[in-house]
Amino acid sequence: MQHSTGILVVGQVARDLVLGIEGMPEGGGSAEVRERREMLGGKGANQAVGLIQLGASVRMLGVVGDDETDSFVLEQARADGIDVEHVIRRGTTALLLDIVEADGTRRLFEDVPESALLTADDIRAHESAFDGVDTVILQLQQPTDALLAAAELARDRGIRLVLDGAIEGPERDRLLGLADVLRADATEASILTGVELGSRDDAKRAAIELLAKGPSLVAVAVPGQGDLVVWDGGEVFTPLGDEEVVDPTGAGDAFVAGLVTGLRAGHGQQHSAELAHAAAGATVTRLGGRPDLTGLR
Ligand SMILES: Nc1ncnc2c1ncn2[C@@H]1O[C@H](COP(=O)(O)OP(=O)(O)O)[C@@H](O)[C@H]1O
Ligand SMILES: [Mg+2]
C-alpha cells in the first residue's frame, strides 16, 4: 500500500518490442536482428518510470489487456514501482514495435486497439485515482472526451495539469485552457498552432501563441536543434547535446519527466528545463523508450 502519491499519469501502457538491426532489408529480403528487447512501454508508462527514477510516487490510469500474456506488462509496471490500482484490464494490450537501424534511424509500428484507449467513462469510474495527487500528466493520444473529463477533474481539484502532445478539433482550446504546462514536439506544436517549426524563432512564435491559450509554461522542440521552454517573463533554449543518438524514442517522455520533477520541487523554470534536457539526452543513448534517469537524481 502506498500512502502518498504525487503524480497521476493518464495515458498509454504498452508492450514494447525493440529490434536493433544493421539496416532495413529490401522488400522480399530479410535482416538479422542484432538486439531484441521486450519490455513495458508506452508513453505513459515510460513517463511514470522516469518520474519514479527521479524520486516521485506515481500512479497510472491506463489500459492493459486481460489475457494471461498481458499480465507481464502489469507485473513489470508493478516491479517498477508504479501504483497500478487504477490500470484497467480489458481487450488486448497496445503493442509498439520499434525497429532501430545502426545509424539511429527508427521506425515505429503502433498497434493500439480501440479497447486500449481510455474513455470518459473510464475516467469517471476512476475518479479516486485523482485523490492525493498534486500533478496530473495527460498524454493527448487519447480520445478527446476522455482528455476533457480528466482535465476537468484535475482543474476542479486544483491539481497541476501537464499536457503532452497535440489534439485537433474544436475542443483543443478548451483543453489548453485547463492546462498549466504543455510540452509538444515540433510536429505536435505545428498541429496545435499551424506554425511550421523550422527555427528557434518559429518555436518562440508557437510557444507564445500557446501560452496565450492557458498554460503558464510551454516547452516545444526545435527539430535538429534543441528545446525551447517559454513562460510568462522568461525562456530558456537548450541545444541538443552531443551524446551519440542510439534511439530517439522516449526522449520526449523523459523530457516531460524531468520538467515535471523540477517544477514540483519548486526549482524554477530554468533549472526544470535543464533537468528536462538532461533527461532527454540520457534517453537517446538507449535502445527503446524506457529511460534510465537514476543518475540525474
Ligand atoms: N542529444 C540530445 N540531447 C538532449 N535532448 C535531445 C537530444 N536528442 C533529442 N533530444 C530531445 O528529445 C525529444 C524527443 O521528443 P519526442 O519526439 O517527443 O520523443 P518521444 O515522443 O519519442 O518521446 C526532443 O525534445 C528533442 O529535442
Ligand atoms: Mg513525444
Image: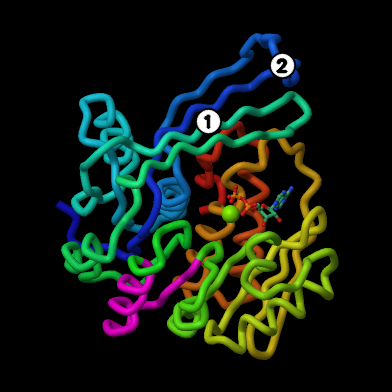
> Marks 2/1: CA distance?
18 Å
Q: In front here: 282 or 72?
A: 72
Task: Specify whether residue 45 is painted magenta.
Answer: no
Q: Is residue 268 left or right of residue 28?
A: left
Tag 1, which secondary structure?
strand
| Crowding at mark 2 (Cα within 10 Å: few <14, some 14-19, many 20+) | few
Which residues are the magenta region?
Answer: 147-163
Q: Amino acid at mark 1?
A: Leu
Q: Is residue 35 above or below residue 90?
A: above
Residue 20: give x, y in percent of width and height.
63, 22
Looking at the rendering, the quadrant in which ligand 2 lies is bottom right
Q: Is residue 19 above or below residue 207?
A: above
Residue 100: give x, y in percent of width and height.
66, 28
Q: Amino acid at mark 2?
A: Gly
Q: In front here: 271 or 66?
A: 66
Residue 6: give x, y in percent of width and height.
32, 65
**Splitting the image into 4 quarters, where does residue 42 fall?**
top left
Question: Which of the two discs, 2 and 1, labels the residue nearer the N terminus?
Answer: 2
Residue 149: give x, y in percent of width and height.
31, 73
In the rendered image, which residue does mark 2 sit on?
A: 27
Could you say which disc has been placed on residue 97 in the image? 1
Q: Is residue 113 above or below residue 11?
A: above
Q: In front here: 273 or 220?
A: 220
